[in-house]
Image (cartoon, helix red, strand yellow):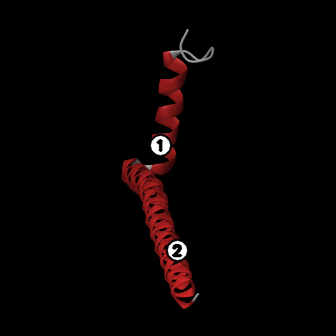
């Protein structure tokens, strides 16, 4: 027994019939087209993964820039409060 109850002889007979119907040249073209389709699919999948990684790193960089900006603004506000408090004490 072979694959799922199909013997090797049955597969050989089916392959022979397919070759007779389509011819070897047509089968080669179909095989080449199928191979290039699989190759294109794999490339698209890897490009998708790379673009997701790139989007993730861009998002992380953007978040870091936002955090740096918030920190800078907080420091500016703290300096302004300190300066205004010192000016108020000097006036008193």
**Mark 2, secondary structure of its residue:** helix
> Could you tell me which quadrant the C terminus lies in?
bottom right
Q: Position of residue 23 (x, y in %)?
A: 42, 49
Q: Are marks 2 and 1 in contact (CB under 8 Å)?
A: no
Cα separation, mark 2 vs mark 1, equals 86 Å
> Count the marks: how many?
2
Q: Position of residue 91 (x, y in %)?
A: 55, 91
Task: Identify the mark nearer the N-term, 2 or 1.
Answer: 1
**Mark 1, secondary structure of its residue:** helix
- Look at discs 2 and 1 and give the one toward the viewer: 2
Instruction: Give the quadrant of residue 84.
Output: bottom right
Residue carrying label 1: 20
> Could you tell me which quadrant the N terminus lies in?
top right
19 or 82: nearer the eye?
82
List the single residue furthest toward the front.
Answer: 92
Q: How many residues crowd around disc 1 within 10 Å: few (fewer than 14), some, or many (20 or more)?
A: few
List the single residue furthest toward the right.
Answer: 5
66 or 5: nearer the eye?
66
14 or 2: nearer the eye?
2
Q: Position of residue 36 (x, y in %)?
A: 39, 56
- The vertical placement of 5 against 69, above or below, is above
The residue that appears at 41% across and 57% down in the rendered structure is: 50
The residue that appears at 44% across and 51% down in the rendered structure is: 38
Q: Position of residue 25 (x, y in %)?
A: 36, 53
List the single residue furthest toward the top.
Answer: 1
Disc on res. 65? none
- The vertical placement of 9 against 20, above or below, is above
Residue carrying label 2: 78
- The vertical placement of 22 against 74, above or below, is above
């Amino acid at each position: 027994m072979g694959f799922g109850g199909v013997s090797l002889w049955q597969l050989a007979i089916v392959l022979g019939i397919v070759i007779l119907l389509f011819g070897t040249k047509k089968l080669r073209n179909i095989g080449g087209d199928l191979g290039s389709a699989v190759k294109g699919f794999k490339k698209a999948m890897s490009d998708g993964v790379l673009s997701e990684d790139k989007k993730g790193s861009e998002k992380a960089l953007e978040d870091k820039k936002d955090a740096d900006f918030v920190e800078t603004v907080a420091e500016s506000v703290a300096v302004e409060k300190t300066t205004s408090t010192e000016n108020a004490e000097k006036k008193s």
